[in-house]
Image: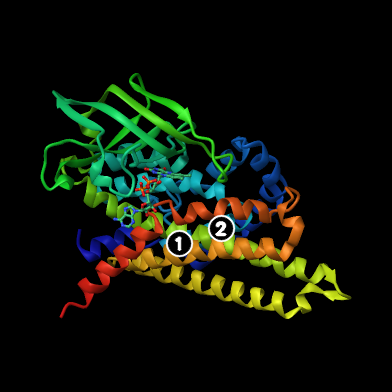
Amino acid sequence: MSVAEKMDEAAGGLSQEEESQIFDTLDKWLERDVRPVVKKFDHADEYPRDIVEQMKEMGLFGAIIKQEYGGLGMSALTYARVVFKISEVWMALTGIFNSHLIMATLVQRFGTEEQKRRFLPRFATGELRGGLGLTEPDAGTDLQGIRTKAMKQGDHYIVNGTKTWITNGVEGTCFAVLVKTDPEAQPRHKGMSFIIMEKGPGFTVSKRIQKLGYKSIDSAELVFQDFKVPVGNLVGGKEGQGFYQAAGGLEIGRINVAARGVGIATASLKDSVRYAQQRKTFGKAIAEHQAIQLKLGDMATKVEAARLLTEHAAMAYDRGERCDMEAGMAKLYASEAAVENSLDAMRIHGGYSYSKDFDVERYFRDAPLMTIGEGTNELQRIIIAKQLVARNKI
Ligand SMILES: Cc1cc2nc3c(=O)[nH]c(=O)nc-3n(C[C@H](O)[C@H](O)[C@H](O)COP(=O)(O)OP(=O)(O)OC[C@H]3O[C@@H](n4cnc5c(N)ncnc54)[C@H](O)[C@@H]3O)c2cc1C
């Protein structure tokens, strides 16, 4: 894809006025419909069905899908800012539409025109919802080690294998699944392809995974047993493109995870600034103790740095530039900032941080996922280093 095509594909078509309307609606919705019920849903680990319906109505399932296919056509920058806001209130909600939107990005970027027309409008309304199936019980970081196979038989593929940790795996019905279409290919990535798979006979959920945090949203193990999927669902219509397509789809995924990290880091800071002024020890607010001030100073600086790195990566994406290094840096820094700020928020809240009456215990349970999802932070460092050398060849 040329840079011009990528720019056309990526850049959003929203005016500033439309953007501020979206942010305004979002702010009102978060305060009215989401904030009051987060603890209830999170503690019960219950899927927030009504909230998902409201997200559908707001068009969030089509946030970065082009308007010609029924989406909102947001730029990556606007999308990142939407994710900042939602994650500041409840990070897990963003997972419900993010993995779905990575699937949509794969179709929008690499699908045939027929696939775009068939899938994107239904993805945009949320009628067809799901996510991305990469990880397997024995292959996560080393994606080329996947074993799920799709073998061609006439005008269908027959799929066999297991995917695990799949976000929206129970509630979703449609997934972009990474498979081996040529298990013997060398190098291994040449035998990998993405196929869009809608649930049906032979495609079942074998387990809902119980988690430390990221509650309410479903993570599942999916099993394919002689599952038949039409050849027409092979993304782009050509085998062997899956590994390259995954890299393209994951850039937006990493920008999203970075934005979620910014949200958690910001919430941790805001709650701490408020609490530090309310809580008194030794005759003064703890905000007046230098030890607490040092924490607040570091936390605020990390929020700003994480936000700027994330916006920088999103702007590079919107310009149609290769941005795996920028997205990797943003994801690495913002996720670590989320973990560190959530822990500092706990220290500032003292014993109350351990109580389920305070949100900081949720930030602390949710933050570590940001260091793992869409490629671990170890992998991000490797990607950054490789790009650094590639861009500075001597
Ligand atoms: C809540 C949750 C939701 C998820 N959602 C999805 C989803 O929707 N779809 C999906 O496909 N997957 C999903 N995942 C899976 C996630 O992407 C993987 O867990 C992640 O990629 C890491 O893979 P792994 O768990 O197999 O770890 P491994 O690959 O086994 O890695 C174990 C450790 O070794 C390190 N490591 C591995 N290779 C290297 C190396 N070459 N150099 C240095 N260190 C290395 C890793 O960084 C890590 O620290 C989800 C995971 C979680 C926890």
| Residue 313 vertical position relative to residue 109 in the rendered view, above or below | below
Split into 4 quadrants, where in the image is the N terminus? bottom left
Between 275 and 12, which is closer to the camera in this rendering? Answer: 275
Q: Dot 2 corresponds to which residue?
A: 22
Q: Position of residue 235 (x, y in %)?
A: 24, 41
Residue 210 horizontal side relative to residue 255, left or right: right
| x 56%, y 65%: residue | 340
Tag 2: amino acid: Ile
Q: Is residue 318 visible?
A: no
Q: Position of residue 329 (x, y in %)?
A: 39, 68
| x 12%, y 37%: residue | 184
Q: Position of residue 393 (x, y in %)?
A: 17, 77
Q: Please report whichever mark, 2 or 1, sits nearer to the chain's N-terminal start.
A: 1
Residue 46 horizontal side relative to residue 18, left or right: right
| x 13%, y 23%: residue | 154
Q: Position of residue 271 (x, y in %)?
A: 70, 63
Residue 205 horizontal side relative to residue 1, left or right: right
Q: Secondary structure at mark 1?
A: loop
Tag 1: amino acid: Leu
Between 201 and 82, which is closer to the camera in this rendering? Answer: 201
Circles 2 and 1: CB atoms closer than 8 Å: yes
Question: Which of the 4 image quarters holds residue 166?
Answer: top left
Question: Which of the 4 image quarters holds residue 54?
Answer: top right
